[in-house]
């Protein structure tokens, strides 16, 4: 069994006691240590800024032309914290409990409690930075509700919360860049992690502008590179989001945990064609005031406004009266799929349901709805050419977030010493299903308030790395391997495009390992993925050369890694013969069609060790021990 290094003692005291026991680096010695941070989203930007403020030397890499373009900017609805400003019964413990329950009791208790504990500090930090959270008329910070909770604990900035939080972290980052404490290197992609004596001590980076490949050494490496939802091709993620950094680290020995835990977001604009390149998220916050429904009559193709109230099925309100439209994402998504599978879907494809705001507009007035969701309504109208103030939105679930990621212990360090993983890139906090507005909370908690402590405990026991380390054989070998892979991709000169292969893989995964999974379907996927991967390395056509700005080459490397990673994802889904959260096995469900866990056999974290391309990875288990919360069959009725 894996050792998560969880501190002893009551859960309420674990983090405070652990911080006190961690070894410290003297302020005068911090400047002797250097940390590489890969990624500049909320987790990466906040971590780099905080480490630099503490006195460490930091080099920050991102694939975008500016840290402001990190995918965190796309988060819409809000960020959770247990401030209890509405005085509606919230607390640190309730946020902790809701998160563990929302994750279907497949997360590590100690990590989740710490997340809830530091959530309030995040809000204070962001307000001090000037993040323009929504406020009530009297000037107090406003809150709204999100799925899986019966309290209002979500702080928000209309439908642009991720953007505003990222601008706050970006300002902290650039402050340190301007004073020379951080070396910022945009348009740079990590292609390998370098180990010295079994410890992560550097990276190999490709400059995306001119193709130059360079090695960089440091005393520790931090990955804050996001999730892998784009393995499905169609997702709400930015097209540049990928699995490269975490997968290359996995190939160097870092365990990949729970890759089958993928989140389907219930409120996205439906697919409209075979050659669509991505999907668009419509914030979960819309379910505060919007009502989800389908016609009661199968195949009803009337305009939504022509269907009277008594012929509408508000199925979430009917099935889950306690939570209504604010059930967790996995439940809302499966419910939409079930209605569409039964023939009640709407739109030209029949793969959509309605989200209606007529009641809210009548009750609150259009100006209130505009103030809360105006930019989201504008975005929907621009994409679909339908005015949601006058007609119901059409929505359908889509891939959005990934709860799996590199395995980390309580200190956010992987099983590879010196390799820390934060934000969506790790697996640690959300179990089998993330509650809405918790991704931003985790990213900023890891970057501002957790990693700066725990990485110091690691560095305090390390001698500063010599500057000549980058000239060692390990760096040279890693760089040559990266160069050889690039040359191989360019030399194939086949007949199919990179996107063609990616689309084929995505369709296979969506059909066999998407919202519903079965043993037969997963086995079929495991037969097909190696065939697609084999043809990829024989018939892909990568245009251009390595020594230039070449986005086809960028995508080629990312899809090559997706074709390896997908196999591990499906193996994990096949091995977990239970349903939990976003992982729904058709063979394991209650008579009502809800997810049916098997706590006796599967109450563990599945951490996979790389054994070679095409070879079955080795399973390591971390037993999940519940000392504070008793696992039970989730009910939101």
Image (tube, rainbow, N blue to C red):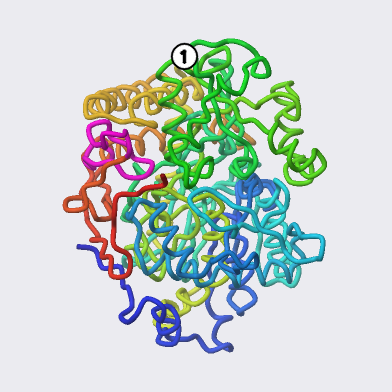
Q: Is residue 72 magenta?
A: no
Left of 349 or right of it: where is 482? left
Q: Which residue is mark 1?
A: 495
Bounds of the magenta segment: 573-594
- Above or below: residue 71 compared with residue 196: above
What crowding class fits label 1: few (fewer than 14 Cα within 10 Å), some (14-19), or many (20 or more)? few
Q: Residue farthest to the front?
A: 310
Left of 524 or right of it: where is 46? right
Image quadrant in which the C terminus is located: top left
Q: Position of residue 100 (x, y in %)?
A: 39, 58
- Above or below: residue 76 compared with residue 529: below
Left of 106 or right of it: where is 266? right
> Is most of the magenta stretch helix, strand or loop?
loop
What number of labels is visible?
Answer: 1
Q: Residue at x 62, y 47 (%)?
A: 75
Q: Position of residue 39 (x, y in %)?
A: 57, 54
Q: Residue farthest to the left?
A: 600
Q: Residue at x 74, y 72 (%)?
A: 179
Give the structural element (helix, strand or loop) at label 1: loop
Q: Nearer the viewer, residue 414 or 196?
A: 414
Q: Residue at x 66, y 14 (%)?
A: 306
Q: Nearer the viewer, residue 156 or 199?
A: 156
């Amino acid at each position: 069994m894996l050792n998560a290094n969880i501190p002893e003692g009551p859960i309420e005291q674990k983090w405070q006691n652990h911080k006190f026991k961690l070894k410290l680096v003297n302020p005068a010695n911090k400047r002797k240590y250097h940390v590489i941070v890969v990624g500049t989203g909320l987790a990466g930007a906040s971590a780099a800024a905080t480490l630099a403020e503490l006195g460490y030397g930091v080099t920050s890499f991102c694939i975008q032309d500016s840290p402001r373009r990190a995918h965190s900017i796309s988060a819409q609805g809000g960020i959770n914290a247990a401030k209890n400003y509405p005085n509606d019964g919230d607390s640190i413990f309730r946020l902790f409990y809701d998160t563990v329950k929302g994750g279907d009791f497949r997360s590590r208790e100690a990590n989740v409690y710490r997340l809830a504990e530091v959530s309030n500090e995040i809000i204070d930090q962001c307000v001090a930075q000037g993040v323009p959270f929504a406020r009530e008329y009297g000037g107090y910070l406003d809150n709204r509700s999100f799925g899986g909770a019966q309290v209002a604990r979500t702080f928000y900035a209309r439908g642009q919360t991720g953007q505003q939080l990222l601008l706050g972290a970006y300002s902290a980052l650039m402050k340190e860049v301007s004073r020379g404490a951080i070396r910022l290197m945009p348009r740079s992609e990590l292609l390998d992690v370098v180990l010295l004596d079994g410890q992560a001590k550097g990276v190999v980076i490709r400059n995306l502008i001119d193709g130059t490949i360079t090695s960089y050494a440091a005393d520790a490496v931090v990955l804050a590179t996001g999730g892998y939802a784009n393995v499905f091709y169609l997702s709400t993620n930015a097209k540049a989001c990928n699995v490269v950094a975490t997968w290359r680290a996995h190939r160097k020995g870092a365990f990949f945990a729970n890759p089958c835990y993928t989140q389907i977001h219930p409120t996205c604009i439906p697919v409209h064609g075979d050659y669509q390149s991505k999907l668009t998220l419509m914030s979960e916050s819309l379910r505060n005031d919007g009502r989800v429904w389908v016609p009661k009559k199968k195949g009803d193709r009337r305009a939504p406004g022509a269907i009277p109230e008594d012929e509408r099925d508000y199925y979430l309100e009917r099935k889950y009266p306690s939570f209504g439209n604010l059930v967790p994402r996995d439940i809302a998504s499966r419910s939409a799929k079930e209605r569409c599978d039964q023939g009640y879907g709407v739109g030209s494809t029949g793969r959509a349901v309605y989200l209606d705001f007529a009641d809210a507009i009548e009750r609150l007035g259009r100006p209130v709805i505009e103030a809360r969701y105006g930019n989201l309504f504008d975005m929907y109208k621009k994409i679909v050419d339908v005015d949601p103030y006058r007609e119901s939105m059409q929505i359908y679930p889509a891939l959005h977030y990934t709860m799996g990621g590199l395995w980390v212990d309580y200190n956010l360090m992987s099983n590879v010493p010196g390799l820390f993983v934060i934000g969506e890139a790790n697996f640690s906090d959300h179990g089998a299903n993330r509650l809405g507005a918790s991704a931003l909370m985790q990213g900023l908690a890891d970057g501002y308030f957790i990693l700066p402590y725990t990485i110091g405990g690691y560095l305090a026991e390390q001698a500063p790395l010599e500057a000549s380390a980058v000239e060692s054989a390990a760096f040279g070998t890693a760089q040559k391997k990266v160069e050889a892979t690039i040359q191989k991709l360019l030399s194939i000169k086949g007949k199919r495009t990179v996107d063609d292969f990616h689309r084929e893989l995505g369709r296979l995964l969506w059909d066999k390992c998407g919202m519903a999974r079965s043993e037969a379907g997963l086995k079929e996927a495991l037969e097909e993925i190696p065939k697609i991967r084999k043809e990829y390395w024989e018939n892909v056509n990568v245009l251009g050369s390595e020594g230039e700005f070449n986005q086809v080459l960028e995508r080629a490397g990312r899809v090559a890694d997706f074709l390896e990673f997908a196999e591990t994802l499906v193996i994990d889904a096949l091995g977990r013969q239970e349903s939990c959260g976003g992982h729904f096995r058709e063979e394991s469900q209650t008579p009502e069609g809800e997810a049916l866990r098997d706590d006796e056999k599967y109450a563990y974290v599945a951490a996979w060790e790389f054994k070679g391309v095409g070879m079955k990875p080795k399973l390591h288990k971390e037993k999940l021990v519940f000392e504070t919360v008793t696992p039970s069959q989730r009910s939101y009725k």
